[in-house]
Image (tube, grey):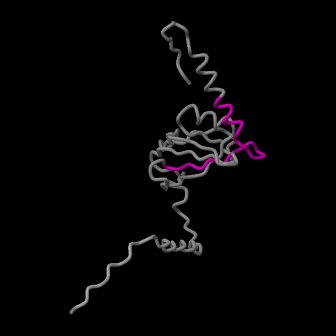
Amino acid sequence: MSSSTGNSTGNDTSVSDDTSADSALDAIISRASFNGKGLLPAVIQQFDTREVLMLGWMDAEALRRTYTSGRVTFWSRSRQEYWRKGDTSGHAQFVKSAALDCDGDTLLVEVDQVGAACHTGDRTCFDADHLHPVVGNAPAAPRPEAPAPTHTEPAEPAERDI
């Protein structure tokens, strides 16, 4: 949120800045489609490498805290409390960007991860268990058709050896 600042006329602009920021955040939260338990899955991705680090759950308050603090906050389904990644481990997640998917039912948070993302100490929560599925291949891209011939000048008659 903004701090109180004066403009050239001496008017305090913090109230309108805070109100518009709150309205923007309220609009984001209203676009989010939380499940029946009031939770939204949040995919956490390293901002520069695009590496998927983990999946966590957020309710509206965790989303609000993440959006306004610059640190990722989750709702712990097992402990029934908020937790901010890194507060005990030091392995913090600093928010770089966030986006709701097209349906509003999943949040993507791009972060700068400090240390391991997984509670096991692995870099990501997806490092330990590679499942080795059958790998599919996309069909080959169609070959571009040869361009249609364009008007060309008639060839010069060949010289004959005499």
Q: Does the magenta stretch include residue 67?
A: no
Q: In which quarter of the image is residue 37?
A: top right
Rendered position, 19 above or below 6: below
Q: Position of residue 57 (x, y in %)?
A: 65, 46
Q: Is residue 43 magenta?
A: yes
Which residue is located at x 55 percent, y 67 percent? 130
- Residue segment shown in magenta: 24-46
Left or right, residue 153 beside residue 37: left
Q: Quadrant of the C terminus?
A: bottom left
Question: Farthest residue in the top direction?
Answer: 10
Left or right, residue 158 beside residue 7: left
Q: Which is nearer the eye, 81 or 151?
A: 151
Left or right, residue 153 beside residue 109: left
Question: Farthest residue in the left direction?
Answer: 162
Q: Quadrant of the N terminus?
A: top right
Which residue is located at x 45 percent, y 45 percent? 114
Q: Where is residue 109 in the image (x, y as percent from the top left)?
A: 56, 45
Rendered position, 87 above or below 119: above
Q: Position of residue 38 (x, y in %)?
A: 74, 42
Q: Which is nearer the eye, 154 or 92?
A: 154
Q: Position of residue 5 (x, y in %)?
A: 51, 14
Q: In which quarter of the image is residue 21?
A: top right
Which residue is located at x 44 percent, y 49 percent? 48
